[in-house]
Image: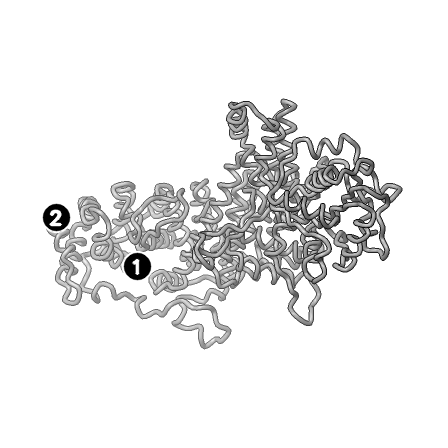
Amino acid sequence: MSEEAPPEPRPPVGTTASDSAPTDTAPSTEASSKDASHPFDEERDGPVSESDALRSLTSDAGHDAAERSEARRASAIADLIAARLNADASGTRIGTLALFNETVSFGGGFHTGGARGAAATRRAGAAVALDRAELTEHTELFVQPEGYDTALDDLCEKALLVLTGPPGSGRAATAVNLLSEATALSGTQDGGCHRLLDPSALTESGWEPPAKNCGYVAEVDEGPGGALDFGVRQLASVAAALRAAGCRLVLTGGHDLALATTSASGNETFAHHELAPPDPLMILERRVLGHAPEPDARPRLHALLEADNAIGALREQPAARHAVRLASVITAEGDLTAAVAALRDPSDQVRSWFQQHRAPEAVAFALAAAVLEESSYLTVAEAAMKLHTALTPPEPAPPDVRFADRLGHEQQWIRLDSAGSGPLGSGGPPRVRFRGALLSQAVLLHAWSTLDGRREAFLEWLRRLLGHRDLEVRARASVAAGVLAWADHHYAVHRFLTAWAGSTSWSQRQAAATALGVAGSRPESAEAVWELLDEWARGGSTAYQRRLAGTAANAVGGILGRTAPGRAVDVLRGALDRGDDWGTLPSVAWGGVHLIHQGQAATLLNAYLDWSAPKDLSPMVVKTLSAFVFAVSHPYERPSAETEAAGVAGVPLLLSSLPEHGEQVAELWERALARRPVQDSALPALREWIDTYAPLCPDGLDRIAALLADVASRPGKHRERLLWWLDKWAADRDRPSANAARLRRRI
């Protein structure tokens, strides 16, 4: 490559042709607005000129700064989800096959009736006696919940006890134990305990117990159609009938029953007790060890539970029945590891939950939590209300929906975690989290694959989240879109991903890039994602095709590029090598910056050396060196993901990492400084290294001195050129550079 003579004096460093170019702004529909205010018109079909593209790289990039910030946040969230999937201790996989495994039984689910007491099974007669085996099952190793003695006193005094609590709180077992003890305390010998087969009979006028001197338990079903209209006056009448017949009744149910029995006056004639969630570990210990275990039995049991991650599984699913289930495996010397893996499989939980909960408010909150997990409660609730509106007919007034009131009953797989315990939430707003690491993804996949009538509304709601003011909401919605692509990659690409990737909305293009990164993080879909990105990168020169190529370049700067850097640079080359069309240069330059920040500088720099090897003024050489100058001009932001490269915040990573990659960086600096037009941006970038970034970086000036000494020692006029510019910067009237003078002496 022929060299230029030492350059003639130019305008002061820091003033380039791009300095007069305003910042890039959103496209306008007015033709008159598409002038010098845009480096190039991204909506114009046909090739973009070299001068326009280079000007776009050196202009004030306020829009690009926002792009970089959001891309990094979205990438960090995508990394978190991928880490959860890869590190899940149970080894559970979720996906189409797992979600639609027809061998899974729906028995139980979130229903908490006794082992033989399925309320949906109606037999002839008004009540059936509980046999000795069922009584023993409930009472022999029972763990009394908090407030049990008070509830027993209330039952003995008032004859009717309404016992409410979330599914899994042990309502049925507690009811049977209360009745057994109340019967024993009353001295009644001939009655026994019975189950009312049809609780709706209690709402009929003039109801009387089927038999005198008996104890009864009745359970109000959970789920659609299960809530019965129990008026307070009617229950007062039931209580009177019970007392007259020498009977007692424990009526169990959930949130709706609790509201019905506490929302009006007149309930002083019967008692109401709310069950707190039980301690599943205590239940398991009692089932395995009994009432009087040996001194060393408990430590041995805990060691077993820790080894098989059973304690973690019970934290995720704390319902009493799960503790009983694991206890039975242990006492039978069964395969505890397999039982824990089955318990932690999110597919069963998700399928059972959707089987029971079809109301729009429940579905809306579950989906909002799945998309926005880790966000604050108010953020999730607001998004859930918007989805609820889309799933329901218009109402004359806003509905009185209170998600938090029903979380413990309808959404037991979700918890609200407070960031602190200060007064009035001063420690931070509560965050919405699923109890299991894989639940949010399983919820999304199940809803997307099965709720056919609601899929369109769900997708439109998700797309609207991409325009949310909160960057975190936009990023999480993008990640959720990638999870949806797992269900059917082909459908997702043609239904929404391609439309987003080619959209004129930058937020939708960024969402498509993030979604593809998440979709490609799974081995079974990775190849299809790479083929799609290659296709987009090598497209034509229409504005739409350029946007697709830009999205591809953005996508490979994230998790995809970190896991397969060689394929990432292939995509970047396909997007960049378009002859006289320079329109993809900004996107490729940003993709290169993100790859460097992902710790893949070596692969990218070697590619830049290869692409610029001719050392001429061909479009590919100038584009490549311009992308390199762009990379050395952008300071490093400390990452939120631990997997990214380490560097000095506020300093370009290619400077703070020296002497690592020193040979490649020196060669690329040599080529960039050798001739115009790249020289016009390379010189200001070099001065920024010398005056701005060197003081911020430990041994920064020494690193630059070693680099420039390497460049100056190469054949040609590199030394002469460097000395000329260092002299000029040192003597600059407006900005004299002491660091330039020091470097001049050292070189």
Q: Amino acid at mark 1?
A: Pro
Residue found 16% across the figure and 59% down from its top: 737
Say whether residue 148 is visible. yes
Percent position (x, y) of residue 740?
16, 55
Element marked by disc 1: loop
* Residue 216 disc label: none
Quadrant housing residue 258: bottom right
Percent position (x, y) of residue 483?
57, 47
Quadrant housing residue 581: bottom left
Quadrant housing residue 35: bottom left
Element marked by disc 2: helix
> Quick check: 473 left or right of 608?
right
Say if 528 sits above or below 292 in the image.
below
Residue found 51% across the figure and 57% down from its top: 473
* Residue 677 disc label: 1
Q: Nearer the viewer, mark 2 or mark 1?
A: 2
Disc 2 marks which residue? Answer: 746
> Quick check: 187 left or right of 603?
right
Q: Amino acid at mark 2?
A: Arg
Q: Earlier in the sequence, mark 2 or mark 1?
A: 1
Neighbourhood count class around disc 1 (C-alpha, 10 Å): few under 14, some 14–19, many 20 upward = some
